Image (spheres, rainbow, N blue to C red):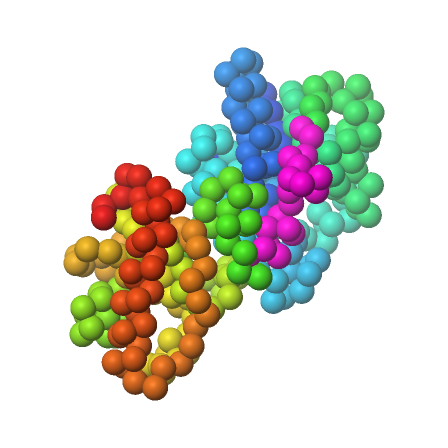
Amino acid sequence: MKYITDVKDAAIDGQSVVTLGKFDGLHRGHMLLFERLKSMKKEKGWQTVVFTFSMNLMDWKFGKDFKTIQDREERCRMLRRIGMDMLVECPFTDEIRNMEAERFVRDILVGQLHAACIVCGEDFRFGHNRTGDYALLQKLSETYHFHLEMIPSVMEEKTRISSSRIREAIAQGNIEDANRMLGRPFTVEAVILDGQHLGRTIDMPTINQIPPVTKLLPPFGVYASVTEIDGIRYNGVTNIGRKPTVGEFAVGVETHLFHVNANFYGKAASVSLFHYLRPEKRFSSVDELKEQMHQDAERAEQILLEDHFQSGCIE
């Protein structure tokens, strides 16, 4: 997949089918758009293009401390895995923000990307003052000779699934609700770092990760999890927080993999969260922490076994 971060480099030989959106989280509604792109590629031979904006759009709209469901690397990797040909992550510059909707369609979507078809959700807006919508695209499709399709929103309990709803669920610790709307488990992807090795002293070795500061995390606490490393999945229990008992302060993701004792330092790991077990707390001693960690592991392992999440994992 081509990954474009400067709109001037966004160019296609031949024709393309393009979808537009902010695409934070790549949830079930987004996946319908991508599946339609893939089917049109199969039918027409058009290249598939996902046009979105860099995370500075979120900073501009919501403030500098805004957190996203996926960081840019996670989003890029997922789009590559599902088979998109090009991701255009357009910087949200003053020029782009002030560009009239018709000019954006004429110069970028049709002029540079040679869009033969545009696929969008029913709520998408673009262009200066958000004047671009499905009705305008429909009108412009006649002028600039492209096909247009709208994919209806995915509804759950009469409410549209959206990135904002998923962010709210994650922030509140409602992992099961977030996973259902995403259509897959909420995941933290990061390289495994060398830690303090405290886990090994209490027979619970762990892998440690530091997620990007822009990554939205659920409330500090302990979660039943499944971790993928080198294509192999391991059941485990994950602590998200600052490890107050041992005096650490950086926000980290620490995971104990059940029945595994291996050196994974430097490898990329994808930690998927399934159930919230308890909040993070400070213990009076390391021995008390050890006892609680073993209880957490037993509970998480039982939950994962009961819910059949262990399929394909090492137990």
* 269 sits to left or right of 116: left
The location of residue 207, given as percent across then percent down, is 28, 62
The location of residue 200, given as percent across then percent down, is 19, 70
Q: Which residues are drawn in magenta?
A: 151-170
The location of residue 184, given as percent across then percent down, is 47, 42
Q: Is residue 283 located in the magenta-colored stretch of the structure?
A: no
Q: How many marks?
A: 0
As drawn, 47 above or below 272:
above
Q: Nearer the viewer, residue 291 or 34?
A: 291
Q: Quadrant of the N terminus?
A: top left
Q: Is residue 162 located in the magenta-colored stretch of the structure?
A: yes
Q: Nearer the viewer, residue 133 or 6?
A: 133
As drawn, 288 above or below 78:
below
Q: Nearer the viewer, residue 3 or 272?
A: 272
Q: Residue furthest top?
A: 43
Question: In the image, what residue occupies the spot 18% across and 68% down?
Answer: 203
* 167 sits to left or right of 194: right
Question: In the image, what residue occupies the spot 19% across and 55% down?
Answer: 260
* Residue 267 placement: quadrant: bottom left
Q: Nearer the viewer, residue 226 or 250?
A: 226
Question: In the image, what residue occupies the spot 50% across and 16% down?
Answer: 42
Q: Residue furthest bottom?
A: 284
* Residue 238 placement: quadrant: bottom left
Does residue 226 appear anywhere in the picture? no
Does residue 184 appear anywhere in the picture? yes
* Residue 289 placement: quadrant: bottom left
* 201 sits to left or right of 74: left
The location of residue 232, given as percent across then percent down, is 26, 43
As drawn, 291 above or below 178:
below
Question: In the image, what residue occupies the spot 63% across and 66% down?
Answer: 64
